[in-house]
Amino acid sequence: MKKKADKRKDAEALRKDVLSAPNMFVAGFEKLTVAQDYELRKTIRGAGGDYTVVKNKIAGKAAEGTPAEKILDKLRGMTSIAFTTGDPVGLAKALTTYARTNPNFKFKAGMVEGRAIEVSSINDLASMPPREEVLAKLLFLINAPAQRLVTAINGVGRNIAVVIDQGVKENKFQA
């Protein structure tokens, strides 16, 4: 049994993690073997996230007054939290892929960019393209009109040059 001081330290450490990570996914992991847990941790690290197993009451106390209070309050069963300060889509993809192969791993709640999301939204998030791909498409859409404008402006100059060149060849200009 942990001492009260140790529980307080755990709550403070979890509170720091909760405050620093705007993206987190809360899950239950009952009946996972040690090998499955190791594979889960490796998957989460590969996606740029961190993973911790928490006591429900400590998680509730640590989340008081934070945006995560809604999702960490009144938890039941064995609970773990995967969190990241980076791309939530990558972590959601890794976790949903793992959940498909290990039915004992079940989502309880989620938080993306400081807002609580439903469990069904985690699968929707996982089906999105990565952040870098979305940014690349956005930049392409922003850049496309500028490219068309430059092409049109260059076209006018090019057309004038062709007309002048044809006029010179046909001796239309007199000095």
Image (cartoon, rainbow, N blue to C red):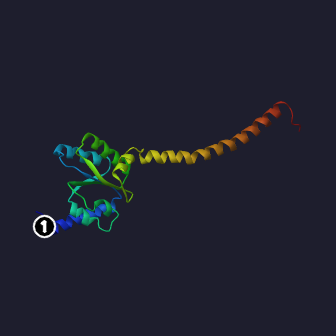
Q: Position of residue 77 (x, y in %)?
A: 20, 55
Q: Which quadrant does the C terminus fall into?
A: top right
* Residue located at (31% from left, 64% from top): 69
Residue ranking furthest to the left:
1
- Pointer 1 residue: 3
User: In the figure, is residue 175 to the left or right of 86?
Assistant: right
Residue ranking furthest to the top:
170
Q: Position of residue 63 (x, y in %)?
A: 29, 64
- Above or below for 42 versus 53: above
* Corner quadrant of residue 111: bottom left
Q: Position of residue 53 (x, y in %)?
A: 21, 55
Check disc 1 and give the amino acid type: Lys
Q: How many marks?
A: 1
* Residue located at (37% from left, 51% from top): 88
Q: Nearer the viewer, residue 153 or 48?
A: 48
* Residue located at (28% from left, 48% from top): 44
* Residue located at (50% from left, 45% from top): 137
User: In the figure, is residue 160 to the left or right of 80?
Assistant: right
- Element class at badge 1: loop
Q: Position of residue 55 (x, y in %)?
A: 20, 59
